[in-house]
Amino acid sequence: MADLDLSQGSTRGIGYNRSRDSNTEISAKLEENTFDQAVEAEAILDFAEDNTRSITNDGNELTIKEYTGKTHPYIPAGGFLDWTGANAGAGEDTIIKGYIKVDGTNYRGFDEGAFLSVDVPSPVATPFPRSADTQAVPDVFIAKQDVKYTMKQLAEGGGWNTIDVTILDGER
């Protein structure tokens, strides 16, 4: 059998004919395609839509965030509550609830967490909704229905607390 001469970069005769230059072109094209896909994903998903606000409790159930009228699946990931500066007066338990319109009309509860007034929550920035397993990491799910999160401080105690809220979500 005769030896193949590969000194010119040719691999003819064994079904493979790609030069080093074409490998460089392929690598550049893959890098360009990956960048284009990242830009497209960023355009599709709007992370952190109107993401930060302060809410002053007043004894009523107050809406933290309500997602309505979605036409594509999205991630209503909840967010974080910042309890910095909150007092821990008697009876100031704060209830955080999550609701979803399963039937398209009526909100039904799917999550409820209580922050007790014994002292300011630790850590000071706490996620909602909280995972039933870890009590620390927000539960993440995908929905197309309306979803809302609420908060209610049960008693004035040492004063109505103002809580800073950061909303996390991924929308199409």
Image (tube, rainbow, N blue to C red):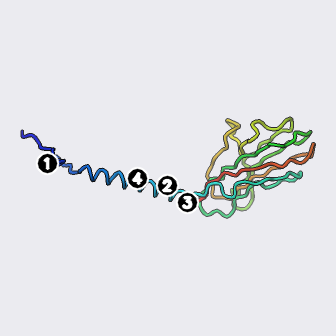
Pointers 1 and 4 in contact (C-beta within 8 Å):
no
The span from disc 3 to disc 4 (Cα, nearest Å) is 20 Å
Give the structural element (helix, strand or loop) at label 4: helix
The residue that appears at 89% across and 52% down in the rendered structure is 58
Q: Which residue is mark 2?
A: 38
Q: Earlier in the sequence, mark 3 or mark 4?
A: 4
The span from disc 1 to disc 3 (Cα, nearest Å) is 47 Å
The span from disc 3 to disc 2 (Cα, nearest Å) is 10 Å
How many other residues sit within 10 Å of disc 2, few (<14), some (14-19) or many (≥20)? Answer: few
Q: Which residue is mark 3?
A: 44
The residue that appears at 79% across and 55% down in the rendered structure is 63
Q: Quadrant of residue 3?
A: top left
Query: Which of the pair 14/6 is nearer the observer?
Result: 6
Q: Position of residue 165 (x, y in %)?
A: 75, 50
How many other residues sit within 10 Å of disc 3, few (<14), some (14-19) or many (≥20)? Answer: few
Q: Which residue is mark 4?
A: 31
The span from disc 4 to disc 2 (Cα, nearest Å) is 11 Å
Tell me if 61 is positioned left or right of 167 in this view: right
